Image (spheres, helix red, strand yellow):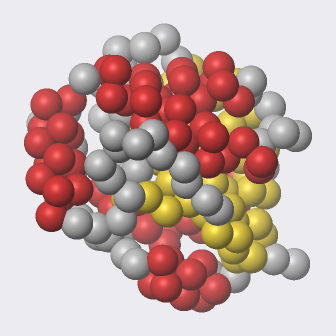
Amino acid sequence: MSLTQKERGKIIAESYRLWTHDAKNVLDVGCGNGVVSNVLRKRLDVLIHGTDIIDYRKEELLFTKMNESGKLPFPDNSFDIVMFNDMLHHSEEIESLLNEGKRIAKTILIFEDCESLLMKVLDAGVNYIYCSDMPIPFNFKTQKQWMELFANLNFQATIGKVSYPFWYPLNHMVFKLDRQG
């Protein structure tokens, strides 16, 4: 399974590359087992600190456990970038997490799944294999719904481009959020 995570990490890194050139200190919220975090660390040349509600890391990674409240356990302006990679659809606290990201970094990067039956089946199955206690509320949103949420939370949002290998069966969206004002 880590091979598929490494490939997804490469896709995420390439999706973020234009937005990370000045960043050094990055938080990966929902870092899971750390495989994707380490791919991002190497490919983007950044220091990654991971956080998740469950610690099931299989990779060496700076880590701080968080609770499920949507409050991130870090002081204001702790990071250059906060990343939410394939995890916001797992949360009941999306707005809180985004506001917390805004509190602790000036830029938020989001790589999120597009809803489909295949995505739901794979997401539930893979997450059960990696960590059977992982919540899976399936809070998927369309690109339009994401953009409306970002505007309501007073973010300046940029939609990015995701490029896939020819064999990759899923679709994702990528966004860069900056604080307004």
Compared with 93, 17 (above or below) is above
Residue 8 screen position, x and y as percent? 43, 36
Q: Horizontal and vertical percent for residue 58? A: 35, 15
Question: x%, y% of residue 75?
Answer: 70, 46
- In the image, residue 65 sits, relative to residue 57, either above or below, namely below
Q: Is residue 53 left or right of residue 61?
A: left
Query: Which image quarter: residue 156?
Result: bottom right
Q: Is residue 3 left or right of residue 156?
A: left
Q: Residue at x 61, y 37 (%)?
A: 13
Number of marks present in the image shown: 0
* Residue occupying the point 72% across, 42% down: 17
Q: Is residue 157 above or below residue 50?
A: below
Q: Quadrant of residue 33?
A: top left
Query: Residue 52 placed where, x, y %?
Result: 40, 39
Quadrant hosting residue 20 = top right
Q: Quadrant of the N terminus?
A: top left
Compared with 142, 103 (above or below) is above
Work out whether residue 55 can be spotted. Answer: no
**Residue, x 54% and y 42% (percent of image)?**
12
Residue 119 in view here:
yes
The C terminus appears in which quarter of the rendering? Answer: bottom right
State the residue at coordinates (70%, 52%): 104
Residue furthest front in the image: 166
| 71 sits left or right of 141 in the view | right
